[in-house]
Amino acid sequence: MTATFTATYSPEDNKLRLYEDRRLDAETYARVKGMGFKWAPKQELFVAPRWTPDCEDLCVELAGEIEPEFTTLAERAEAKAERLDALADKRQAQSSAFLRAADDLSQAFHMGQPILVGHHSERKARKTQERMHNAMDKSVKAAKSAQYWQWKAAGVESFANMKNSPRVRANRIKTLLAELRDLQRDVNHAQVCLSIWQKTETEDQVRKLSRAHVNGNALVSWERAKELEDGEISPQDFRTRCIESAKRAINSPKRRRWIDHVLNRLAYERDLLGPVARYEGELSPVILQAFAREHGAMKPSAKAVPEGFALESAVPLPLHIASEKAVTLSSDDWRDLMQSVGYTVPEKKDAKPPILNFRAGELVAPNRFHAGETQTFRQIELTKTEYAKVWADQRGTRTSVCGTFRFKICIDPTAPGAYFSRPWVAVFLTDSKEHPVPESFEKQANAA
């Protein structure tokens, strides 16, 4: 008699679960385990560590459909915590029992009764002493085990609360967006490859492009390029295979399912985090480019047009934005689109203080390593060429102690000895524009 399955999915932890009413046959068990499902004995079910299209297909094949998970993350955590608490209570009871047994055995040595060496009672006394020590050891071991299971129970509940905290949910959204960009990046690269191979005509071009890279990624795999070099395939057949491979990557149903799944998870997480406010500020090409880039568009470019704003990319835009390389929408339509996909325009950061170039004997900045303390930089004079020769990680800027301006610093290139022993100094560029001394610096110098 075959097993009857029930398949569920939980968006809280992105896991698929398989419930069965009887033991699986060897073939089905091997398939389930081969897909990555693991047996959870306490819950009496198989669980996949994460959703994948293959795991979903197997669940649909076995169960017919996938239902929402019956229990929430909090309920599962509570049930597990109860099991662990019960185990801790059991170990605590064992510890008390062993302690009582050790106490009873210790009565043989009441009032410091010694073991009489050579007496007929010596053997029994030593045996009693050994049993007493064993009981004490088992009591201590059981007590430590009880503490461990109590700690595990508290950790389970703490983990469930942590998973549902707004901060963790916001970080999870960032992770999902990164996963979405990774998936879309593969599609974008396939689009670039398809465009290049379709324009390739001569055999020399095919051979040259077989080892070429675009944006740091190879146009074709090393194994396939080697087949062309070894003469196992003609250049024209090689080009045809590359075009077909790019088309498969672009139109891959499995990748499309992955992208749709990530978009659905993003919608779920954002809904629990709270409604996304519609952006009512002034739109700009920079805002739209950042929006498209976060959702996987390849080098997006936006500009203002009479109808609103036009957004275009070197390859077709992600399908949840548009199905073509370019799209033009009104300002209100752009705001609605950004709200529908849960995009929040980042708040504008405060501008950094200006970098000033003026002569001073020394400049003072807050100490980055000791709060409340300051750091003094002796000023030296360099040309722009001399300053540029200093390694990038050995130069930079610091904000003045008054916070109204910044100044250039570097490791003193004129000091003797090894670089790591040279001091950091402020820099005045002799062949750059000289700024007037700021009032805040003059007040600080006068106060000193």
Image (cartoon, helix red, strand yellow):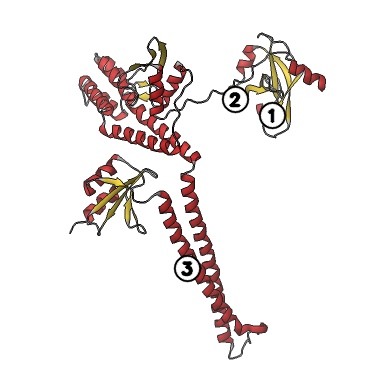
Where residue 42 sits in the image (x, y, percent)?
37, 59
Q: Which residue is found at the position 42% from the left and 35% from the top?
A: 270
Mark carried by residue 90:
3
Front disc: 2 or 3: 3
Q: Are marks 2 and 3 in contact (CB under 8 Å)?
A: no
Mark carried by residue 393:
2
Question: Does 131 sit left or right of 442 as displayed?
Answer: left
Which secondary structure lies at badge 2? Answer: helix
Q: Quadrant of residue 221?
A: top left
Say few, some or many: other residues with alpha carbon within 10 Å of mark 2 (under 14 / 14 to 19 / 20 or more). Answer: few
Tell me the CA gap for discs 3 and 1.
62 Å
Q: Which residue is found at the position 60% from the left and 80% from the top?
A: 106
Q: Earlier in the sequence, mark 3 or mark 1?
A: 3
Q: Earlier in the sequence, mark 2 or mark 3?
A: 3
Q: Is residue 2 above or below residue 54?
A: below
Q: Which residue is found at the position 39% from the left and 35% from the top?
A: 266
Nearer-the-camera pick, 91 or 210: 91
Q: Earlier in the sequence, mark 1 or mark 2?
A: 2
Which secondary structure lies at badge 3? Answer: helix
The amino acid sitting under disc 1 is Ser
Nearer-the-camera pick, 292 or 182: 292
Front disc: 3 or 1: 3
Nearer-the-camera pick, 285 or 233: 285
